[in-house]
Image: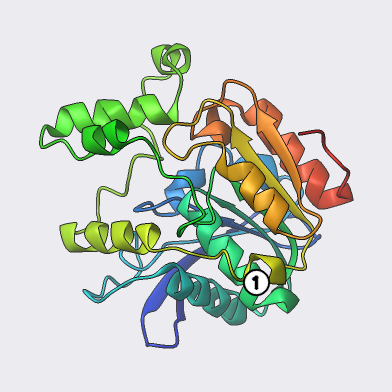
Amino acid sequence: MPHATAPDGTRIAHQVRGTGTGTPLVLLSGQSNSHHWWDSVRADFDASRTTVTLDYRGTGDSDKPDVPYSTPGFAEDVVSVLDALGIDRADVYGTSMGGRVAQLVAARHPDRVRRLVLGCTTPGGLHGLERDREVSTALASRDAQAARATLLDLMYTPAWLATHPGPYGTTGDPRMPAYARGRHLVASRRHDAWEVLPDITAPTLVVHGTADRFNPSANAPLLAQRIPDARMHLIPGARHAYFEEFREVASPLVLDFLDACPVYPA
């Protein structure tokens, strides 16, 4: 497994797939997840592009230092991977916490991002809209089975779960040590990109499911209005893992945007 070395010496595992000759596409996963977050839909992008994923520090085959993590730090890890691969400029598609990280990659390194897609994410800080308190309470239940059931219900609709019994790649990296999981949670909660969002120069598409209670869909227009000339597309009925359950809508939507950058209705 190849690794890039972050500025602080942490080794970041990354994976390169696909046979495309166009602009490489970096796929950034959600909180406490490795690159396996993308397993079910990665082939949609591999067919026409070279795709790059990584294991955040604390996950997968990356180092797992017991030190504070942050979304700005994760963003620098992404840039370290691009440097290691000799990629000067890429398209970046981040979902959930990956969308938070993608915001900072694009804002802090505008020369490295050609197109940007932000899925089911939030600007964070005082301007971001938090999930309902009862959702957070249910996710923090000491009953692990109940907490997992809550998470699956937030990710997918009951109809989809009834016909897709798993395993699921979006419910957390089982190899993560407990301390790293906690570090990820703090990093995600402390994310605040509001002040730098206007610095994003890459054409941007914001995607969200209308039935997302894990990360409320009201965050989508906040991002779209704050990022210059951003476009927004809401997927009716989709929950947090819209990119998987609604892949027949989401994957072509993203690819069309990356290839032609058309205007989509809200």
Q: In which quadrant will I find the C terminus? A: top right
Q: Does residue 182 appear in the picture of this structure?
A: yes
In this rendering, would 137 be left or right of 157? Answer: left
In the displayed structure image, the side of residue 106 where residue 1 appears, left or right:
left
> Residue 69 is drawn in which quadrant?
bottom left
Mark 1: few, some, or many residues within 10 Å (few <14, many ≥20)? Answer: many
Q: Residue at x 44, y 75 (%)?
A: 73
Residue that mark 1 sits on: 107
The residue at 28%/74% (across/down) is 68
Relative vertical location of residue 51 with respect to residue 201 in this rendering, above or below: above
Give the x, y percent position of residue 61. Answer: 35, 64
Q: Residue 220: x, y in percent?
A: 62, 43
* On screen, residue 152 above or below 113: above
- At horizontal 67% and vertical 32% (from top left) the residue drawn is 234
Q: Nearer the viewer, residue 212 or 19?
A: 212
Q: Position of residue 120 (x, y in %)?
A: 55, 42
Outermost left residue: 142
Along the line of sight, which residue is nearer the eye, 42 or 115? 115
Tell whether 141 sits left or right of 175.
left
Residue drawn at x 45%, y 60% is 125
> Observer-nearest residue: 169 or 127?
127
Residue occupying the far front of the picture: 126
Hey, what amino acid is under mark 1? Ala
Note whether 266 is above or below 17 in the view shown: above
x and y percentages locating residue 157 in the rendered image: 46, 19
